[in-house]
Image (cartoon, helix red, strand yellow):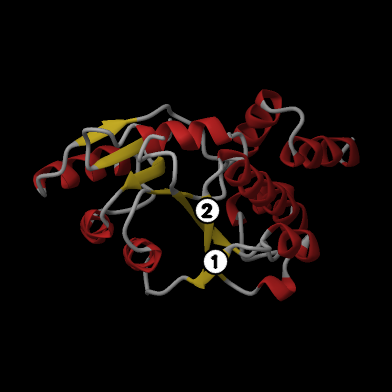
Amino acid sequence: MSPYDAFTVLVMAKAPVPGQVKTRLGADIGHDRAADLAAAALLDTLEAVEASGASGHLCLAGDLSHAVRRHEIERVLDGWTVTDQRGDDFATRLVRAHADAGDGVVVQVGMDTPQVTGGALRSAAAALAGHDAVLGPAPDGGWWALARRDPAVAEVLAGVEMSTASTCVDTEQALQRAGHRVALTRPLTDVDTVADARNVARQVPGTRFAQAWHALAEARR
């Protein structure tokens, strides 16, 4: 067995509460509908983690008791480690989440890539062979995945501005300046806009996300 076959996926997520998640998308389609899409994307992500064979660790912002699809999410999370996000900004919350996840191979993702597969998560973990960190680029300039063995690797994120057109490049450079060997894995599109949602739903028609998107499209006709 490869040492990268046993790993943890750390999912950074917001509870899918209307008005508190996917607000950019919600401005176009309504916050209730955006929250339902976010819930579907989270469920698809959690299912991909299960398919990868990894252990699951959810680091959550917000209160699931008010979330869309609350009961379905709670059922899927049975057996997972669930911790709260801590920090005043997202970069700080990422660093602390990695510290909470501890030592060993960890692949950190968000909830904005419902097209992710178990195979993509395993590939990100395997790419750590010969490297200290693996980044999964996103077409908008961000990144969808960060894999590492040592949680200290993620400490460089505290100095990187998140959610910009150069976040992935800036993260890669910060990692390299810290002396870490960095590899890139396959790119995936984050769902932030109506166009993103439409394109991702076409890519993965059998997912909960695609089903929710098509139901939304029918309701808007």
Q: What residue type is labelled 1?
A: Thr
Q: Quadrant of the N terminus?
A: top left
Q: In this view, does 98 lie to the left or right of 36?
A: left
Evaluate whether residue 137 shows in this view.
no
Residue 39 image position (x, y, % from top left) = 70, 54
Vertical position of residue 112 compared to residue 12: above or below? above
Residue in the image at 26% along x and 42% along y: 133
Query: In the image, which disc is placed on residue 40?
Result: none
Determine contact: label 1, label 2, CB under 8 Å.
yes
Quadrant assignment for the C terminus: top right
Looking at the image, which residue is at 56% across and 39% down? 52
**Label 1, on which residue?**
81
Q: Which of marks 1 and 2 is nearer the N terminus?
A: 2
Quickly name the residue at label 2. 55
Q: Which of 3 and 199 is in front in this view?
A: 3
Q: Where is residue 148 in the image (x, y as percent from the top left)?
A: 30, 47
Looking at the image, is 151 positioned above or below residue 6?
Answer: below
Judge by depth and name the residue closer to the eye, 27 or 91.
91
Name which residue lies at 38% across and 35% down. 2
Q: Which of these two is toward me, 175 or 190? A: 175
Density class for disc 1 (Cα within 10 Å; few <14, some 14-19, many ≥20) is few
Task: Give above or below for 187 relative to 61.
Answer: above
Quarter of the rendering containing residue 130: top left
Q: Which amino acid does label 2 sit on?
A: Ser
Q: Where is residue 11 in the image (x, y as percent from the top left)?
A: 51, 55
Measured Cα–Cα span from mark 1 to mark 2: 9 Å
In percent of width and height, residue 182 lies at: 22, 36
Between residues 107 and 204, which one lies in front from this camera angle?
Answer: 107
Left or right: residue 46 compared with residue 57: right
SS at mark 2 in the image: strand
